[in-house]
Image: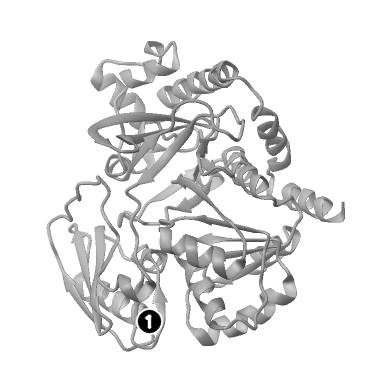
């Protein structure tokens, strides 16, 4: 009870209403598909009307195509509106935001960067509460309860006092992933074992490296009941290593650009949260598991920076029929196209996609980037830039910070293609490594 009270205190400090929404989501698991659709249609019409009247980007886009929110009477009518892409939103600048509100009042976040294109998005506290409640919904399926201790693997830089207080209130032990070598992991594991977390949550690549460390150092008895991955691809060999090391099943989550989209149930299906309307646009390719489809997302809760028919760049295979778990929400059978590898340095450190993304955010003028590794001696960084990019200071920041993270023993070379082409999967890979065998691939 006292842990839940602390959580309520944290909510009050931040101005969130997570517990209320979490309770609503638990109820919505039992709703009929028709009731879910009615809820989504009501939210959709409000978002479209808001975007048209308060967000210049959408008003101009839709007027230019001769369409408006009045053309959408049912969910499937949404296809009458044009798709949107990250490059469009980046180019539009503040015109993608609700111009009736000072953007300093919005919360901001950064995409995980798995496509190699830095992206800052904005959100209301209401939307962020839906995001957290959506995550909690998936965690609860795996066995976690609000107030249970948990470990978060994330790149958050140096924590200020407010973040440290937040972690205390939410019973969280933060594990930074800016230095994933054995010395750091030995030090951290002592804290983690004493903390006795019920859940371990973080980027799939980071959890995999921690699991590999535990298998090599079995004296650390860390066995959380729940392991939840997010952010990058949960490869089959990642899953096997993680479940072996922690003696616990791992549950995956799917989302992007500040949206919690789907949670994996005990039967492996990714159930779509009602707070996001998901379209599957056929790609024309059949597989043994079903037809490949491009995934388009429309957030039904974010008025700060609406995401409407947003092409996130992912390919998936939609599920059909009821899921054995009994939940009525629609589901994704298989996710394809989120491909992220790990850079390995001579000194034994490991760099994930998020390490590079956090550095790239500091440099103006980089539109796309990709990291290529053929040997542990060095990496090639491909940068597609615009005229705001300054080569000498840009390369210096990248060399200095990547060398610091990597242990100072990597050769770093740069290439400047005009663009980084898309692979057949439709999603540009952030890291291309030929050292997969070193990770057990």
Residue 207 x/y as whole percent: 52, 66
Q: Which residue is mark 1?
A: 406
Q: Nearer the viewer, residue 196 or 147?
A: 196
Residue 288 x/y as whole percent: 31, 38
Chosen colour scheme: one colour
Q: Is residue 256 left or right of residue 141?
A: left
Residue 414 x/y as whole percent: 18, 73
Residue 154 visible in the current orientation: no
Residue located at (55% from left, 67% from top):
244
Quadrant for the C terminus in the image: bottom left
Q: Residues within 10 Å of mark 1 (few under 14, many from 20)?
A: many
Q: Nearer the viewer, residue 348 or 353?
A: 348
Total numbered badges shown on the rendered structure:
1
Above or below 248: residue 109: above
Residue located at (48% from left, 72% from top):
209
Specify the farthest residue to the right.
1
Specify the farthest residue to the left.
418
Residue 378 visible in the current orientation: yes
Above or below 262: residue 433: below
Looking at the rendering, which quadrant does residue 23 occupy? top right
Residue 39 x/y as whole percent: 58, 20
Q: Secondary structure at mark 1?
A: helix
Above or below 220: residue 229: above
Q: Nearer the viewer, residue 242 or 52?
A: 242
Residue located at (15% from left, 55% from top):
419
Looking at the rendering, which quadrant does residue 295 occupy? top left
């Amino acid at each position: 009870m006292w842990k839940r009270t602390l959580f309520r205190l944290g909510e009050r400090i931040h101005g969130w209403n997570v517990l209320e929404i979490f309770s609503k989501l638990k109820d919505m698991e039992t709703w009929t598909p028709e009731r879910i659709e009615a809820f989504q249609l009501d939210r959709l019409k409000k978002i479209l009307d808001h975007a048209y009247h308060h967000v210049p980007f959408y008003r101009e886009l839709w007027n230019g195509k001769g369409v408006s929110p009045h053309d959408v009477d049912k969910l499937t009518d949404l296809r009458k509106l044009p798709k949107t892409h990250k490059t469009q939103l980046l180019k539009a600048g503040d015109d993608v935001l609700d111009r009736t509100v000072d953007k300093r009042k919005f919360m901001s976040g950064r995409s995980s960067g798995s496509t190699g294109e830095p992206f800052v998005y904005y959100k209301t506290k209401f939307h962020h509460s839906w995001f957290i409640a959506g995550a909690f919904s998936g965690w609860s399926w795996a066995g976690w309860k609000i107030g249970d201790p948990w470990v978060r693997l994330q790149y958050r830089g140096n924590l200020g006092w407010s973040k440290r207080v937040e972690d205390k209130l939410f019973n969280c032990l933060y594990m930074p992933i800016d230095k994933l070598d054995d010395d750091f992991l030995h030090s951290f594991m002592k804290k983690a074992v004493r903390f006795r977390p019920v859940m371990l949550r973080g980027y799939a690549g980071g959890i995999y490296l921690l699991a590999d460390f535990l298998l090599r150092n079995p004296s650390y008895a860390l066995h959380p009941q729940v392991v939840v991955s997010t952010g990058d691809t949960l490869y089959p060999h990642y899953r096997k290593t993680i479940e072996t090391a922690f003696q616990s099943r791992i549950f995956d989550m799917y989302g992007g650009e500040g949206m919690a989209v789907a949670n994996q149930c005990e039967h492996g299906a990714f159930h779509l949260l009602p707070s996001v309307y998901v379209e599957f646009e056929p790609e024309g390719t059949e597989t043994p598991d079903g037809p490949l489809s491009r995934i388009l997302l429309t957030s039904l809760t974010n008025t700060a920076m609406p995401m409407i028919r947003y092409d996130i760049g992912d390919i998936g295979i939609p599920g059909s029929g009821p899921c054995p778990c009994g939940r009525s929400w629609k589901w994704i059978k298989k996710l394809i196209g989120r491909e992220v590898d790990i850079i390995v340095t001579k000194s034994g450190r490991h760099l994930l996609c998020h390490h590079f993304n956090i550095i790239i955010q500091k440099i103006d003028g980089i539109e796309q980037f990709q990291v290529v590794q053929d040997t542990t001696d060095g990496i090639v960084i491909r940068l597609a830039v615009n005229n705001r990019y300054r080569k000498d200071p840009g390369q210096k920041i990248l060399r200095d910070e990547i060398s610091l993270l990597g242990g100072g023993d990597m050769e770093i070379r740069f290439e400047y293609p005009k663009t980084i082409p898309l692979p057949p999967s439709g999603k540009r890979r952030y890291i291309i490594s030929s050292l997969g065998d070193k990770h057990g691939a």
